[in-house]
Image: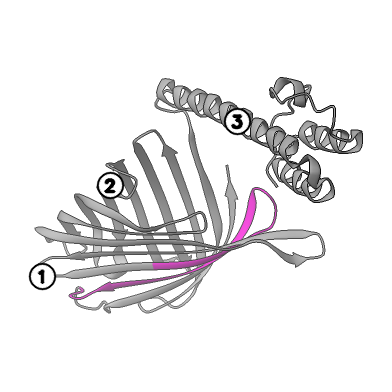
Amino acid sequence: MTKLPILAAPLLLLGAPAAAELPEAARTMIDAAIASGDAEQVEAVVATARTAFPDDAAEIDAIWNAYQAELAELAAVEAAREEEEIRQAGLLDHWSGQGQIGAFQSSGNSDEFGVTAALELEREGIDWEHNLRVTADYRRQNGVTSREQFLARYEPHYQINPRLFAFGLAQYERDRLQGYSSRYSLSGGIGYKLVDTETMELSVKAGPAYRVTQFTDGTDSSRLAALFGVDFDWDISDNIKLTQDANSTVETGGEALLIVDSANTSLTATTGLEAGLTDALSARLSWTIEYDSNPPVGAVSTDTLTRFTLVYGF
């Protein structure tokens, strides 16, 4: 339901012609709808008035057209105000994001339950978008660390046109069970939004990369690589009833990042399903697969990770 500012003295301020011939009941009904600030209600009432009073359709249309013009003017003023606010914002302003905490079950190099936490921040400007993500999975049992995985990623986007964008990527990873104590990746390139609607977004990106890996055996490597990425988000439903008093918004999102070099190809793909419990709190189920084509001795190529987390948006 779209709510808009209440317009005082609707018919007079909208510049509508005097509606003396329009029955008082119709005028009162339309004025009340406009005063409510609900655009959908106004449209429905105007449609009803046209049906009920066909002889006065011209006057009703004049009121409707004036109302639409007024809304367009208000929207333009608000859009200009918001754009100016963004342009004047400081570096730390207009960030939003979400934090996650929960449990996971893994298979591959580790097969146990543990704790997972994540923080994602996003800042959208006029042409720029900044994304920052930090995740940590850690498990220590009987004095032995059985899982120690950390990821930090910063990815800015510059929107060239509504679908084409340039991106940069700086990423740090640590996964001792996979055989490396630290791995750094730098990349940049071009991306394109294949689908961009209110309920679904699908984009692809590609570019050169440079990767430095420090292995747990003390050796290291530095290589040029190529990066390919896919990002997918889909709002399945706006409002799903989970329990008697809990509304839910379900969102499924997928992300895949492939880095190829001459010695090792790595793939990370994550798919998630999210159900909102309140306006700010939701439950999330996600599944991640991580693949390295040439792992160190003693490590396997593929890890999978299933996470069950609570997500708080802010």
Amino acid under label 1? Ala
Mark 2–mark 1 distance (CA, rounded to whole Å): 30 Å
102 and 167: which is toward the camera: 167
Whether residue 222 is visible to the viewer of this picture, yes or no, is no
- x 85%, y 27%: residue: 20
Which secondary structure, mark 3? helix
In front of the other: label 2 or label 1? 2
Residue sitting at the far front:
55
Q: Which residues are magenta?
A: 270-295
Which circle's residue, 1 or 3, is located before the other in the chain?
A: 3
The residue wearing badge 3 is: 69
Q: Percent from the top left, x then y, of residue 282?
A: 63, 57
Which secondary structure, mark 1? loop
Left or right of 132 on screen, residue 300: left
Which circle's residue, 3 or 2, is located before the other in the chain?
A: 3
Which secondary structure, mark 2? strand
Amino acid under label 2? Phe
Residue sitting at the far right:
25
The residue wearing badge 2 is: 165
- The secondary structure that dominates the magenta segment is strand
Residue 305: image quadrant is bottom left
Mark 1–mark 3 distance (CA, rounded to whole Å): 62 Å
